[in-house]
Amino acid sequence: EVQLLESGGGLVQPGGSLRLSCEASGFTFSSFAMSWVRQTPGKGLEWVSTISGSGGSTYYADSVKGRFTISRDNSKNTLYLQMNSLRAEDTAVYYCATGLGATKYYFDYWGQGTLVTVSS
Amino acid sequence: EIVLTQSPATLSLSPGERATLSCRASQSVSSSLAWYQQKPGQAPRLLIYDASNRATGIPARFSGSGSGTDFTLTISSLEPEDFAVYYCQQRSSWPRTFGQGTKVEIK
């Protein structure tokens, strides 16, 4: 069974930093791209970032480029999102997500989400 | 960036009725489009990928159609558990983008 478990969310002041983690199980982690998708309270979904299976390719939304860094440790089956220079508008539930097989280019499996609140 | 525009914003229907949701892309995404369902307090659930393929375990009452810039999600006969918010998403190009969502509510 595929499982994705996020952690690391919390309350942080504007300008601060936070690192999110997503521990994966139930599939060959290194074979598949992984992504972060966020959802602001009461609003829609926003794709944040994607990293290839090897970690050699990364992609970012313009809204986070230069502030967030996606990475992965395939030996630990863990995905990360380092968030720096946080702003109020980064407040959201952050989900890690992936797709496998025929759905590998989409978000077929999601974690439960971790809430990041940026506020003074 | 490809902008996805969903309509209507809200659809008020009764159980048993047919729901038709629209997603229009600002430029062609070929068939690289998915539909998700989200209920309050839950992560989104993939329903349809590549415009018309049902994901694993998705009931046959859900169907997707379209290509290029115009796409439709159809729920043939609404069940009580289908009242939720639905999002489309394209994977044709970076950045990946979602539509703003259509809420299907009980009339």
Image: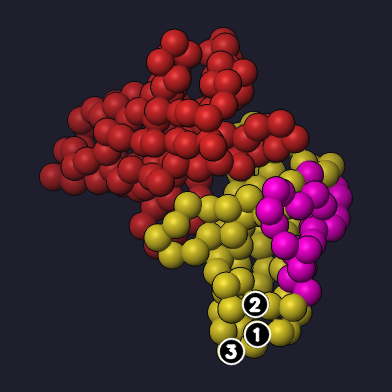
The residue sitting at 74% across, 57% down in the picture is: B24
Q: Quadrant of the C terminus of chain B?
A: bottom right
Quarter of the view holding residue A27? top right
Residue B69 within the segment the image draws in magenta = yes
Residue at 53% across, 30% down: A26
Quote the CA–CA distance across marks 1 and 2.
6 Å
Dot 2 falls on a residue whose secondary structure is: loop
| Residue B83 forms part of the magenta stretch | no
> Where residue A107 appears, x then y in whole percent?
60, 41
**Residue indicated by mark 2:** B79
Q: Look at the image and give the residue range highlighted in magenta.
A: B50-76
Q: Are marks 1 and 2 in contact (CB under 8 Å)?
A: yes
Marks 3/2 in contact by CB < 8 Å: the verdict is: no
Rendered location of residue B74, percent (x, y): 77, 68
The chain coloured yellow in the image: B
User: Real-space Cα distance between discs 3 and 2?
Assistant: 13 Å
Q: Nearer the viewer, residue A80 or B71?
A: A80
- Residue B15 is tagged as 1
Please provide percent x and percent y for residue B44.
53, 53
Chain A's colour?
red
Q: Is residue B25 visible?
A: no
- Tell me what residue is drawn at x 62 percent, y 18 percent: A31
Q: Amino acid at mark 2?
A: Glu
